[in-house]
């Protein structure tokens, strides 16, 4: 049986770990509020730009943009949004798993994959798994700046423009609620067509000032940037929520462990006392 | 139809959403006056003031670039950054203008010429907005 000193030491170390995890839980809880606000703030813009894009898609434009073009797919690019820090449960790994599954599915259909990575965790993962990485962006912080993502977006869009990549997917966690984060893969390019029949058969077009090509290019690029930015902000909210839950669970597990160890400690102590007593009684009887 | 729905959004906030009788803005090819029933138009938004005539008087915003989408009953401003004109600080704008001018004249410094020119245009537009607002008051 273990001795009392050892058990006491173990209890002390678990208690200090518990202190750390509960502190991290509180930090995540307070950050979660802020990241959620940030997520909400960005929504009107992405909703509006989405509306405009769908108007454009229904208009009878004389100019068709490459982003709407369906090409035969030889290569796909995944933009992977992950966190910079760990300790947030299965948040990143669940997302990576779904991406790897999708890439494997593409492989069987003869489609190669490349990756543009946001966040240190994605870089670390795809470094160990392998795969062609075209761009990375990390250490964006709790309040990501849209400008920090422009470089990565440009790399991916240029690849598409040069026909090196035919489809682009955005992979990130969707914030359902504090308890649930849903890993999702959405298609960015080609832009999904509008399915509403009533809207498709219209015969109007915009007046474009200046040129349609130039304007659409700018607007669609902005749209893609906005979607990626929104995904990063949402992923941040997911990270804090997942971290809070993970740390809460860790603190609870530490509590359970401490309870068990205290029971063990008392048993060991009692056994030692009983043994000593019986030794004394035995010794007295011998005298 | 005497009113048109207007929304001004920038990537980090919704600035305005409501009805207006008339909208004035600076498009990339010049000044625009948008009345209800305007033909569909898509254009760039140049740095400058966006003025709305509403039931309860006038509203002015400052936009530093972006896009305007016009539908017969709706105008959407997708601004890069937008702010209410009341919250613009003239001293700050003038400072930004001076800085941009200095950067422009100091060509050999390690900087981007087009970027500085854009900054200067933006600062000038900001000052214009403030001064217009003053005149109206």
Image: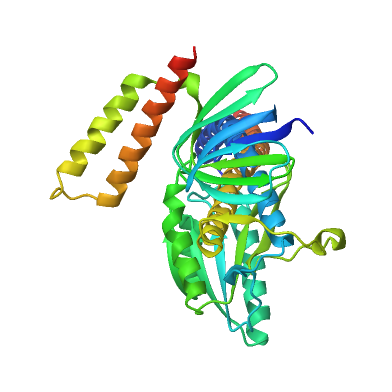
Q: For residue A250, which quarter of the picture?
A: top right
Residue at figure coordinates x 50%, y 67% from the top left = A157
Q: Is residue A261 visible?
A: no
| Picture quarter with the C terminus of chain A | top right
Residue at figure coordinates x 21%, y 43% from the top left = B104
Residue B36: percent from left, percent from top: 71, 36
Residue A85: percent from left, percent from top: 49, 49
Q: For residue A150, which quarter of the picture?
A: bottom left
Viewer-closest of A102 and A179: A102
- In this rendering, would A185 be left or right of A215? right
Residue at figure coordinates x 25%, y 50% from the top left = B113
Residue B99: percent from left, percent from top: 23, 34
Residue at figure coordinates x 65%, y 60% from the top left = A94
For this orientation, the residue located farthest to the top is B137
Residue A98: percent from left, percent from top: 67, 66
Q: Is residue A140 visible?
A: yes
């Amino acid at each position: 049986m273990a001795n009392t000193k050892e058990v006491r030491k173990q209890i002390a170390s678990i208690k200090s770990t518990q202190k750390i995890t509960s502190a991290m839980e509180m930090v995540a809880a307070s950050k979660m509020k802020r990241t959620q606000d940030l997520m909400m703030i960005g929504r009107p813009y992405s909703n509006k730009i989405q509306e405009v894009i769908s108007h454009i898609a229904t208009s009878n434009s004389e100019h068709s943009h490459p982003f709407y073009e369906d090409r035969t797919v030889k290569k796909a690019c995944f933009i992977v949004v992950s966190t910079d820090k760990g300790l947030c449960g299965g948040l990143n790994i669940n997302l990576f798993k779904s991406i790897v599954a999708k890439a494997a599915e593409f492989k069987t259909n003869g489609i190669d994959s490349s990756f543009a990575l946001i966040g240190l965790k994605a870089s670390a993962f795809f470094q160990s798994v392998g795969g062609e990485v075209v761009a990375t962006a990390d250490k964006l912080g709790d309040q990501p700046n849209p400008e920090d993502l422009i470089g990565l977006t440009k790399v991916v869009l240029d690849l598409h423009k040069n026909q090196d990549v035919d489809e682009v997917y955005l992979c990130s966690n969707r914030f359902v609620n504090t308890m649930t984060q849903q890993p999702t893969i959405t298609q960015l390019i080609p832009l999904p067509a509008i399915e509403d029949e009533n809207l498709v058969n219209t015969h109007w077009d915009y007046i474009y000032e200046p040129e349609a090509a130039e304007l659409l290019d700018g607007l669609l690029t902005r749209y893609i940037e906005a979607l990626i930015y929104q995904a990063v902000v949402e992923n941040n909210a997911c990270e804090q929520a997942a971290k809070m839950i993970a740390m809460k669970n860790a603190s609870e597990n530490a509590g359970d462990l401490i309870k068990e160890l205290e029971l063990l400690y008392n048993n060991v102590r009692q056994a030692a006392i009983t043994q000593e007593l019986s030794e004394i009684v035995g010794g007295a009887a011998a005298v | 139809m005497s009113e048109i729905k207007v929304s001004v959004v920038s990537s980090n906030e919704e600035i305005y959403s409501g009805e207006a009788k008339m909208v004035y803005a600076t498009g990339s090819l010049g000044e625009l006056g948008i009345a209800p029933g305007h033909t569909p138009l898509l254009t760039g938004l140049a740095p400058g003031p966006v003025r709305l005539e509403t039931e309860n008087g006038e509203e002015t915003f400052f936009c530093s670039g972006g896009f305007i989408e016009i539908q017969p009953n709706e105008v959407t401003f997708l601004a890069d950054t937008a702010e209410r004109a009341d919250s613009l600080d003239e001293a700050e704008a003038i400072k930004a203008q001076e800085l941009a001018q200095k950067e422009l004249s100091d060509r050999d410094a390690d900087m981007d010429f087009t970027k500085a020119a854009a900054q200067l245009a933006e600062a000038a537009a900001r000052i214009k907005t403030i001064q217009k607002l003053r005149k109206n008051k």
